[in-house]
Amino acid sequence: MSARSALFWSGIDRFFQQGVQFVISIILARLIAPEEFGLIAMVVVFIGISKQVMEGGMRAAIIQRKDLNDSDCTTALTLNLLLGATLTGLIWLCAPYIATFYREPALESVARVLAFGMLLQAPSVVQIALFSKSLDFKKQTYAAVISGLFSGAIGIYMAYAGYGVWALVTSTLTGTSLLTLSLWFFSNWRPKSAPSVDSFKRLFPYGSRIAVCSILETVFNNIFPLLIGRFYAAADVAYFQRAYSLKEIPINNLHLTVHRVLFPLLCAKLGDSEAYLSALKRVFHLMAFLVIPGMALLFLIAEPLIVFLVGAPWLPAAPILQMLCVVGVLNQFVRMNDIVLTTNGLAGLALKLELLKRGLLLVVVLFTVSHGVLAMVLGLALQCVVSWVISSIAVNRIINFGFFKQLVEIGLYGILGISLAYGCHTFLDLSTWSAFAQVVTISLVFGSCYGSLVFVLRLSGLRECLGLVLPKFRTIL
């Protein structure tokens, strides 16, 4: 498969997994109480960490291996199956302790059933790696469509029938099973050789390092639901997860899209500091033009959007979503600075800064966990500010583009976004309107005002955006 075709099918796969599954989760959220969603979120923390151990970094090791042979694949498959079976048994035995940790007796049976997901997923690791290695994302997309639609339909049916949390459990396991079966159906590879010690020695050193990094990332990514579940109610975990997912959909997709372009763009400019800095500033303007108003608008419509999507029972997620919007803006520019370090070959420095940021996050969480979920998210925002300052100091030493210079570049977008958000909040009284009407009206007013002001002020972020999407408009502006 060509790189262009691979990119297309990779995008389709991403659209389906995030778009369609998001729609399914919205439907389920209207049928299942937040408390029951919270139970799943609590267990997923442990299941997610266990799945990273089960993979053992074999997916990355297979993709990275140039002289891959059948014995390597069989060895990886065997290791995944053994780890999957071992971890399934371990979660089964530890389920009572997980329930005790969260003080939720119902978690014991939920954890034990969900644990089988690791055993069901284990056979898919090698197949996914082989498809990815050959850039065959088309078949992966087919498998994702089959598993996603059928498991979603089963979950919705069971939710309508009143099965509650077990609708989510069944949907999860069904999706995992169908994905594994579909991948094996579409794949031509079948194990023909016996697993070997030599193959293990070739794959494990690289794979184990990847696994350790993935495990640490999973732990820190789940530290909020882990501690919220421990010290607060299951519903609070669900509110946080719902708010986080709503914030992540636009932010994460935008970051991945820009990173795909920015990394090679900046690498091509290495050696020419002026061209490098110019390209970086252009991307800063583009990100500020998109992220700041996007998060400001999401902050504005948080309450009606949640009511429209998942219903009034989820309203406690609204203030959490609003705070996470602030986090989303700050973290985006931290990521931009990280890209500068990696493109300049300073992976070691980037790793040290990442460890420092993780340490700051741990300190913040420990100090705020006793003060409520909102206090924890506020602490996360403060951690992002400190991380931005620290990372910009490192960037300033490389290309003389420190924190205050970055603020100057993006400051006007921030002023416009905050001012318009304040104006809409103050002068638009739509409290008697339906949630859908509020979302549409506020979005139209905010978007048209922001776009008009950016056009009148001739801010370069608009020009960069149109230059990417509609090249012929570049000369007009």
Image (spheres, helix red, strand yellow):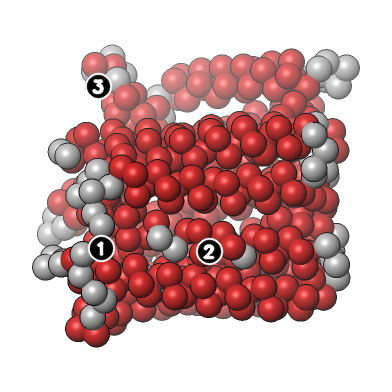
Q: Quadrant of the N terminus?
A: top left
State the residue in front, 106 or 174: 174
Whether 387 is drawn above or below 145: the answer is below
Measuring from the top left, give residue 89's x and y in whole percent: 60, 75
Labelled disc at residue 471: 3
Q: CA distance from mark 3 to mark 2?
A: 47 Å
Mark 2 highlights which residue? 118
Q: Amino acid at mark 1?
A: Pro
Whether 285 is drawn above or below 190: the answer is above
Can I make out residue 202 in this image? yes
Label 3 or label 2, whichever lies nearer to me, is: 2
Q: CA distance from mark 1 to mark 3?
A: 49 Å
> Residue drawn 24% across and 74% down?
194
* Earlier residue among tags 2 and 1: 2
* 219 sits left or right of 314 in the view: left
State the residue in front, 219 or 86: 86
Q: Is disc 1 placed on a helix, strand or loop?
A: loop
Q: Is disc 2 placed on a helix, strand or loop?
A: helix
Q: Quadrant of residue 164?
A: top right
* 167 sits left or right of 57 in the view: right
* Earlier residue among tags 3 and 2: 2
Total numbered circles: 3
Q: Residues within 10 Å of mark 3 (few under 14, many from 20)?
A: few
Q: Quadrant of the C terminus?
A: top left
> Residue drawn 66% across and 48% down?
170
Q: Amino acid at mark 2?
A: Met
Q: CA distance from mark 2 to mark 1?
A: 20 Å
Measuring from the top left, give residue 270's x and y in whole percent: 16, 58
Labelled disc at residue 191: 1
Can I make out residue 230 in this image? no
* 65 sits left or right of 74 in the view: left
